[in-house]
Image: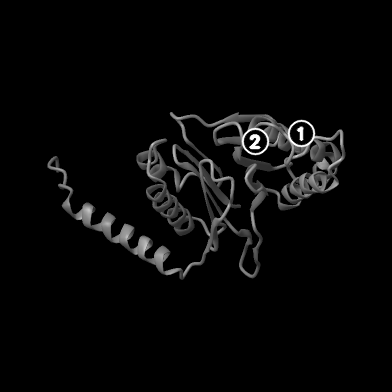
Amino acid sequence: MTYCVGLLLDQGVVFASDTRTNAGVDQVAISPKMHVFEVKNECVIVLLTAGNLAITQSVVNCLRAAVEDDSADGKHLHNVKSMFDVAGLVGAELRNTYEKDGEHLKNHGIDFSASILVGGQIKGEKPRLFNVYAAGNFIESCKETPYFQIGETKYGKPILDRVVKYNSEMLDAVKCVLISFDSTIRSNVTVAAPIDLLLYRTDSFHADCRQRITENDPYYVKIRRGWADGLKSVFTTLPNPDWC
């Protein structure tokens, strides 16, 4: 399991993903689920992946190979003209991977499970954010629904629903994302730090604000403790029922 969040804001896009890929009594694995494609001053594209790691790694590696090949007549993530086209390429690669591996996975009792958040900005348009499903189809976020989650979503969703708006300040959104991750990590052992965080500011065309947040990161610890203490404080002020 995993947990990834993408927030589309007026100021830019916030991306965050955990790094746990396997959880059991004696097996814990760490692998990045955030993948950045950048042409400085031209585009920044970020993929957040959830699901079967072999599937998502295959998709990302094929997308990178297409960029490196850069054949004259081939589209890839560095030469398309819109983020819509980017989402289309990611979806197409998911379908290609299914055509190649889907039947083999089925024969071994394994579902074809993968989803990818695709966000960023290409020069000439505003930042955009998409959620690409295993079938290769996708949806786009909007001002009314400015965020997507994939993976283990239910524990971190309430705080995002209550706090995040399209016009939220970016650093306020970062606080909210970290609280969302803390809530998820507390309730599900298959999600864990380190957390990869990337802040992309509109029209910067540079993915320079990146951070890997460990469990003992001083700011993360402060946020976790402050949120827990705040919840307890508010809870004690709530009135008891008067009907029994």
Query: Quick check: 33 above or below 154?
Result: below
Q: Which mark is residue 128?
A: none
Label 1: how many residues lie within 10 Å, few (<14), some (14-19) or many (20+)? some
Quadrant that contains the C terminus: top left
> Residue 241 lies in what quarter of the image?
top left
Which residue is disc 1 drawn over?
A: 92
Residue at 38%, 37% (x, y): give it. 167
In primary-sequence order, the first of circles 1 and 2 is: 1
Q: Position of residue 193 (x, y in %)?
A: 53, 62
Residue 228 occupies which quadrant of the picture?
bottom left
* Label disc, if present, on residue 132 of the rendered structure: 2
Q: Please report the residue visible at 86 percent of the width from the left and 33 percent of the height from the top.
A: 73
Task: Determine whether, in the image, residue 168 is placed left or right of residue 90.
Answer: left
Could you tell whether 41 is left or right of 236 in the image? right
Quarter holding residue 205? top right
Depth check: 212 or 206 in front?
Answer: 206
At mark 1, the secondary structure is helix
Q: Is residue 166 left or right of residue 241?
A: right
x, y percent for residue 124:
60, 32
Q: Marks 2 and 1: in contact by CB < 8 Å? A: no
